[in-house]
Image (tube, rainbow, N blue to C red):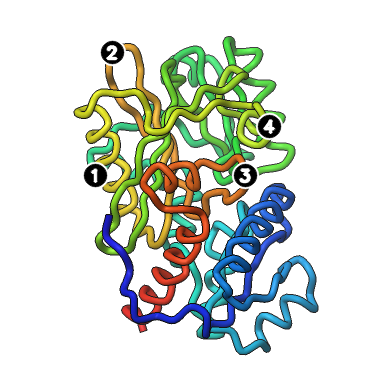
Amino acid sequence: MAKPKEDIDLRSCRVALLAGGKSGEREISLASGRGVAKALDEAGISYDFLDPANKDELGALIAGDYDIAFLCLHGKYGEDGCIQGLCEMISLPYTGSGVWSSALAIDKAKAKLFYEKASIPTPASYTLFKHENYSCDDLVKDIGLPCVVKPLTAGSSSGVFIVQNTEELDKAIKSIFLEDDELLVEAYIKGDEYTVAVLGNEQAEALPLIQIIPQNDFYDYQSKYAPGGSVHLCPAPLDEETTSYIQRLAEKAHEVLGCQGLSRSDFILDSNGDVYILETNTIPGMTDTSLCPDAARAAGINFTELCQRIIKLGLEAHRSNG
């Protein structure tokens, strides 16, 4: 596993730890922030815990003399390039992917175009816009049943529906359009769920594979964050060839989307042995039940060291770009 350069003394850094925000994933973001705060305390790194939803704390970020922002903001305004753009405007280095990469990865339809260009298999899909005329019969003809309906840019599996017929499809579309302007109708791939964290900038490497066994029908919000909602098997019980293949796909996704620092890509392995990528997260969760810390531990990287590496990668990315 490639390591960032060791000439950065993090104990002399002042970190703005950003968590909370205004998205529907606010509570998960705060939980991630608390997890990272504990790691920074253990490492002796100075930080201020700031919530961008609070204007005074957002002002403190802009006015403060920080060396880097550690981003624990999930979903809208945090994972979509908005906060990254603000950091760029005030010349503040930050952890994770840049503005363009963040905006691209969170848009599931656009990310699919890049997956396909890089020959990364992904389920067939159709992007539907709020004021577009649509026929559920035509969608079923193109995508098939069952199929998955999900918001284009939401995270944590929020608002995801697996539908079995045209009536359920129409209901799911209308439900999502109450909150969002775009959605994705995607072919449903039945199989085992896996996830791969990738750590690094230009020379990123995949961490050990995790198999996810959710208690519910798929890895939904409850399965992700409720205690006992899912079982994580890490390293995943797969043969070496399949494991390596999925890891290479995750590394390729990290590269083609322009990710930096830490990303996590989710996959389905069907009964025929075919692998499909579902999405890539540029700010993965850092809670007690999150996947990336599990993968890092399996690679011999404890949580505190993982947070330190993420900071160093952020500082290195800023140096190379600036």
Alpha carbon separation for disc pair 1 and 3: 33 Å
Q: Which residue is mark 3?
A: 288
Q: How many marks?
A: 4
Q: Earlier in the sequence, mark 1 or mark 3?
A: 1
- Dot 1 or dot 2: first in sequence order is 1
Q: Nearer the viewer, mark 1 or mark 3?
A: 3
Disc assigned to residue 227: 4
Residue 219 visible to an observer of this rendering: yes
* Residue found at the very far left of the displayed protein: 241
The answer to whether residue 71 is above or below residue 128 is: below
Label 4 element class: loop
Q: Residue at x 27, y 37 (%)?
A: 120
Assess disc 2: are there few (<14), some (14-19) or many (≥20) residues with their C-alpha within 10 Å of its C-alpha: few
x and y percentages locating residue 298 in the rendered image: 40, 42
Spatial CA distance of label 2 from label 4 is 32 Å
Q: Is residue 306 above or below residue 298?
A: below
Compare marks 2 and 4 and give the one earlier in the sequence. 4
State yes or no: discs 1 and 2 in contact (Cβ < 8 Å). Answer: no
Residue 229 picture location, percent across and down: 64, 27
Q: CA distance from mark 4 to mark 1?
A: 36 Å
Disc 2 marks which amino acid?
Asn
What is the secondary structure assignment of the residue under circle 2? loop
Mark 2–mark 3 distance (CA, rounded to whole Å): 34 Å
- In the picture, the quarter occupied by the C terminus is bottom left
**Mark 3 to mark 4: distance in Å?**
9 Å
Which residue corresponds to the image point at 80% horizontal and 78% vertical from the top-left? 56
Circles 2 and 3: CB atoms closer than 8 Å? no
Q: Name the residue: 74% across, 37% down.
A: 178
Disc 2 target residue: 272
Residue to which mark 1 is pinned? 118
